[in-house]
Image (cartoon, rainbow, N blue to C red):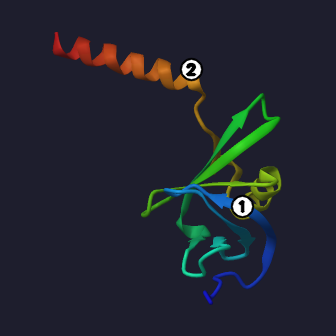
Amino acid sequence: MVQSINTKSDLVINGTSHMGLSEYGKIMVGDKGFEFYSDRDNKNFIQIPWDEVRRVIVSVMFKGKWIPRFAIQTKKNGMFTFSSKDPKRVLRAIRVYIKPKDIVQSLGFFQVISRSLKNIFRKRNKKS
């Protein structure tokens, strides 16, 4: 069995890790970090200490009525994407340990399209 990095857990909830193939398991938010443990395989786990977290990126739909998934961006190891049964509870538990300014909303569909079009035209102007 894997040793937890937390000494006290604030929240344990069913969740899904979207790293490659989706993996079902438990999300644990505790005093030392964020943890995900797979239901199928004990060796498949993710442990992220709070001092390693750069920001939490939240995908928001329908003006905050529905949060399908959230991602944790780390300083060294990239992004880890998760979803849970009650994402608002998870994000409230994370907010205790992460500054609220580091929890940001992801870009919407039209924002991504407009940025890509602006970049295309910007590249054309530089070539001229």
Q: Rounded to the nearest whole Å, what is the CA distance between mark 1 and mark 2?
A: 28 Å
Rendered residue at 48%/21% (across/down): 113
Is residue 74 rendered to the left or right of residue 32?
left
Residue found 57% across the figure and 25% down from its top? 109
Task: Please state if 45 lies on the left or on the right of 65 as rendered.
Answer: left
Disc number at residue 40? none
Q: Amino acid at mark 2?
A: Phe
Q: Residue furthest front?
A: 40
**Going by the image, does 23 lie left or right of 78?**
right
The C terminus appears in which quarter of the rendering? top left
**Secondary element type, mark 2:** helix
What percent of the width, then of the height, locates residue 37? 65, 73
Name the residue beneath numbered marker 2.
110
Image quadrant where one finds the N terminus: bottom right
Question: Which label sits on residue 15?
Answer: 1
| Residue type at numbered disc 1 | Gly
Q: Quadrant of residue 41?
A: bottom right
Which x, y percent locates residue 97?
71, 64
Discs 1, 2 touching: Cβ within 8 Å: no
Residue nearest the observer in this picture, 110 or 37: 37
Q: Nearer the N terminus, badge 1 or badge 2?
A: 1
Q: Height in image: 45 above or below 1?
A: above
Q: Is residue 124 above or below residue 98?
A: above
Given this view, does label 1 or label 2 mark the residue nearer the observer? 1
Q: Is residue 107 left or right of residue 98?
A: left
Q: Is residue 74 above or below residue 113?
A: below
Q: Residue furthest left?
A: 128
Vertical position of residue 75 compared to residue 63: above or below: below
